Amino acid sequence: MPTCTEEGVTTYTCECGDSYTEPIPATGHDEGEWETETEPACTTEGKELLKCTRDGEILDERTIPALGHTPGEWEVTKEADWIHDGEQIKKCTVCGEILDTQVIPANHTPIYIIGGCILLVILAVVFIIVKKKSKKTSKG
């Protein structure tokens, strides 16, 4: 019997006992459909194969381009407070790789307001004390 790549042989035998053979040509490969062997991922290519439907031999292969990352929404990993900076990250929704990181600045405003108020109170108290002392020294 012939195969995809090798010819076969047919033998004819006469009643008298003589025989002869004739070659049967190879059938050749029968291309099937492209099949995915490896799926592509965000950063890696995939691979497709074209196989013969008769003997399964790989006739051709081709790459499938990498898909690229799919960025998700910003996700806060550390909240900022009045003193310390926070952090947020953006991950790929497919593979989970961190694609970007940003600092969330600390909110110093309340500290400055409180510090400013305390300073004003201290200055007011000092002013009152100085004023009272200056009145005492001017009277007597």
Image (tube, rainbow, N blue to C red):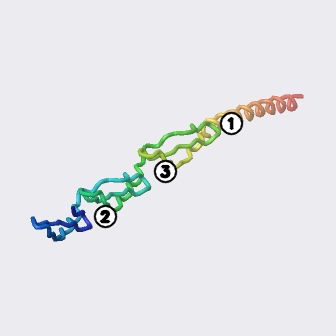
Name the residue beneath numbered marker 1. Answer: 115
> Considering only vertical position in the picture, is 36 above or below 17?
above
In the displayed image of the protein, which residue is found farthest to the right?
Answer: 140
Q: Where, by quadrant of the figure, is residue 116 drawn?
A: top right
- Kindly identify the residue that appears in the image at 73 percent across and 32 percent down: 124
- Which circle, 2 or 3, is nearer the viewer? 2
Q: Amino acid at mark 1?
A: Gly
As measured in the structure, the alpha-carbon distance from the residue carrying label 1 to the one carrying label 2 is: 74 Å
- Residue type at tag 3: Leu
Q: From mark 1 to mark 3, how far is it between C-alphas?
A: 39 Å
Q: Specify whether 95 is left or right of 107.
A: left
Across and down, in percent, residue 55 comes to 27, 58
Q: Where residue 106 appears, x then y in whole percent?
A: 60, 41
- SS at circle 1: helix
The residue wearing badge 3 is 99
Residue labelled with disc 2 = 60
Along the line of sight, the residue nearer the viewer: 124 or 23? 23
**Which x, y percent locates residue 100?**
50, 50
Dot in front, 1 or 2? 2
Question: As rendered, which of 51 and 103 lies closer to the eye?
Answer: 51
Which residue is depicted at the point 40% across and 54% down? 68
At horizontal 64% and vertical 40% (from top left) the residue drawn is 84
How far is disc 2 from disc 3 in space, using C-alphas? 35 Å
- Disc 2, disc 3: CB below 8 Å? no
* Quadrant housing the N terminus: bottom left
Looking at marks 1 and 2 on the same chain, the residue that comes earlier in the sequence is marked by 2
SS assignment at label 2 = strand
Circle 3 — which element? strand
In the picture, the disc for residue 104 is none
Residue 138's place in the image compared with 33, above or below, is above
